[in-house]
Amino acid sequence: MSEINLTAFILPKVLTKVKLFGSILSSFQFGVVLLVTADNVVFYGALEGYF
């Protein structure tokens, strides 16, 4: 019986951590994509003589 209570107590905390980690990871991936895109825009812009 106590194991079930323990699982019910721990599981939400684990899920919260997983969700937090997932959101951090997705925002990090988004940041990387944004960075690479901006980098390419600047690079090709420089090639075309815009910058």
Image: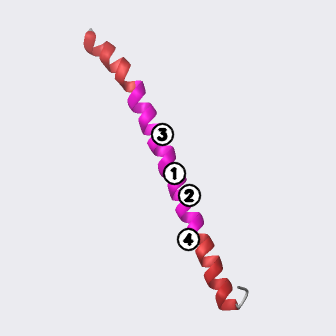
Magenta stretch, residue numbers? 12-36
Q: Is residue 47 left or right of residue 4?
A: right
Q: Are marks 4 and 3 in contact (CB under 8 Å)?
A: no
| Mark 3: secondary structure | helix
Q: Amino acid at mark 1?
A: Ser
Residues packed near mark 3 inside 10 Å, few (<14), some (14 to 19) or many (20 plus): few
Q: Is residue 1 left or right of residue 9?
A: left
Residues packed near mark 2 inside 10 Å, few (<14), some (14 to 19) or many (20 plus): few
| Mark 2: secondary structure | helix
Q: Amino acid at mark 2?
A: Phe
Q: Is residue 31 left or right of residue 50?
A: left
Counting residues from the start of the chain, the first of labels 4 and 3 encountered is 3
Residue at x 42%, y 35% (from the top left corner): 17
Q: Main secondary structure of the magenta part?
A: helix
Per the rendering, the mark at residue 20 is 3
Q: Which residue is mark 4?
A: 36
Q: Which residue is mark 2?
A: 30
| Mark 1: secondary structure | helix
